[in-house]
Image (tube, helix red, strand yellow):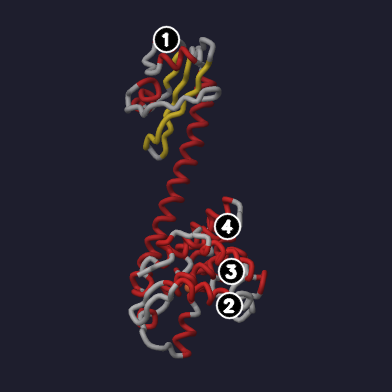
């Protein structure tokens, strides 16, 4: 409500005016609040509210909530005004439905990503930790909130393409043969092919496709070098390598933090972006990374 810092207590269906609009699934105009079922008379008095109109927000037969407008003048709402607010509620319903669909789609994809981790027994929790490390780096680089958000959405899916790699290869404990490496190296392209048509990730798909590129151009799948590798992918690359090195595997213990940081420093400018490496090492040394992301059993 404009001009107040009022936050209303939750209403039950049928309660107050908007609760009745929701219960009855129809607009509820009130020309005199003092003579209505309005539940907050002290607010009406403090804000000099005299009349109001509540309409339900309905999507696909389901009531999602209600919208209310108020007036400081006694007012009898006409059908044009009621139709206008009902139309606005219709747009709100579509927006809420889209947001819910978007959330459901993301959850479905994240579930899919977790099933891949289950397939690859060595990487339990890997995607989630990579996401948190990558988001911390993006924050440290002071990227705009939309970019940090994008990295949070796409990073859990960076290895989605492993769905197309045989379990035998993913679970193999010994050295991989050259042919098996060829298989493994296909996962960024498989993931990008699966997620590419989903427009909501936009440029974020680069994290899936390019997280194994190296700044010296010797990475895969595109062999991009330096700043030709999209920034979000360069961030994900360090986060991914960091988690791989700190995590224990059935056949080896995770490396101590100091050795991991030495390795990142050593590979800076070859495998990793120099500036991002420096920022990351500095961040870890200053205690800016959640300790749970550093020691992984
Ligand atoms: Fe990967």
Q: Earlier in the sequence, mark 2 or mark 3?
A: 2
Q: Is residue 124 above or below residue 172?
A: above
- Picture quarter containing residue 64? top left
At a point 36% along the width and 79% down the height, the residue shown is 167
Measure the alpha-carbon separation of dots 1 and 3.
Answer: 65 Å
Measure the alpha-carbon separation of dots 1 and 2.
Answer: 72 Å
Do the residues under discs 2 and 3 have CB atoms within 8 angstroms?
A: yes
Measure the alpha-carbon separation of dots 2 and 4.
Answer: 20 Å
Q: Earlier in the sequence, mark 2 or mark 4?
A: 4
User: Which element carries disc 2, helix, strand or loop?
Assistant: helix
At a point 47% along the width and 85% down the height, the residue shown is 181
Position of residue 86 measured from the top left corner of the image (x, y, whole percent): 48, 28
Disc 4 crowd rating (10 Å Cα; few below 14, some 14-19, many 20+) is some
Tell me if 138 is positioned left or right of 245 in this view: right
Measure the alpha-carbon separation of dots 1 and 4.
Answer: 54 Å
- State yes or no: Cβ of the residue under disc 4 lies below 8 Å from any atom of ligand 1: no
Question: Label 4 belongs to which residue?
Answer: 140
Position of residue 42 measured from the top left corner of the image (x, y, whole percent): 42, 14
Closer mark to the observer between disc 1 and disc 2 = 2
User: Which element carries disc 3, helix, strand or loop?
Assistant: helix
Question: Label 2 belongs to which residue?
Answer: 267
Question: Label 3 belongs to which residue?
Answer: 277
Question: Label 1 belongs to which residue?
Answer: 34
Do the residues under discs 1 and 4 have CB atoms within 8 angstroms?
A: no
At a point 44% along the width and 15% down the height, the residue shown is 30
Measure the alpha-carbon separation of dots 4 and 3.
Answer: 12 Å
**Label number found at residue 256:** none
Disc 2 crowd rating (10 Å Cα; few below 14, some 14-19, many 20+) is some
At a point 37% along the width and 18% down the height, the residue shown is 39
Q: Earlier in the sequence, mark 1 or mark 3?
A: 1
- Closer to the camera, 294 or 180? 294
Measure the alpha-carbon separation of dots 2 and 3.
Answer: 9 Å
């Amino acid at each position: 409500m404009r001009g107040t810092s009022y936050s209303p207590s939750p209403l039950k269906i049928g309660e107050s005016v908007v609760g009745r609009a929701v219960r009855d699934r129809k607009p509820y105009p009130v020309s005199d609040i003092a003579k209505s079922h309005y539940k907050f008379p002290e607010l009406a008095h403090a804000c000099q509210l005299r009349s109001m109109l509540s309409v339900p927000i309905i999507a696909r037969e389901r009531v999602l909530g209600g919208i209310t407008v108020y007036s400081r003048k006694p007012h009898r709402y006409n059908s044009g005004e009621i139709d206008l607010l009902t139309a606005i509620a219709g747009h709100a319903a579509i927006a809420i439905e889209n947001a819910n669909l978007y959330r459901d789609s993301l959850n479905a994809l994240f579930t899919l990503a977790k099933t891949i981790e289950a397939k690859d027994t060595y990487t339990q929790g890997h995607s989630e930790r990579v996401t948190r490390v990558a988001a911390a780096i993006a924050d440290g680089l002071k990227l705009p909130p939309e970019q940090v958000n994008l990295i949070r959405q796409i990073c859990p899916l960076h290895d989605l393409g492993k769905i197309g790699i045989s379990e035998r290869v993913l679970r193999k404990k010994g050295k991989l043969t050259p042919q098996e490496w060829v298989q493994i190296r296909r996962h960024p392209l498989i993931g990008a092919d699966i997620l590419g048509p989903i427009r909501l990730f936009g440029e974020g798909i680069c994290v899936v496709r390019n997280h194994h590129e190296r700044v010296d151009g010797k990475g895969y799948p595109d062999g991009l070098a330096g700043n030709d590798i999209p920034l979000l992918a360069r961030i994900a690359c360090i986060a991914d390598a960091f988690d791989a090195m700190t995590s224990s595997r059935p056949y080896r213990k995770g490396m101590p933090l100091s050795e991991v940081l030495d390795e990142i420093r050593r590979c800076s400018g070859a495998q990793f972006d120099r500036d991002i490496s420096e920022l990351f090492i500095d961040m870890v040394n200053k205690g800016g990374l959640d300790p749970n992301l550093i020691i992984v059993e």
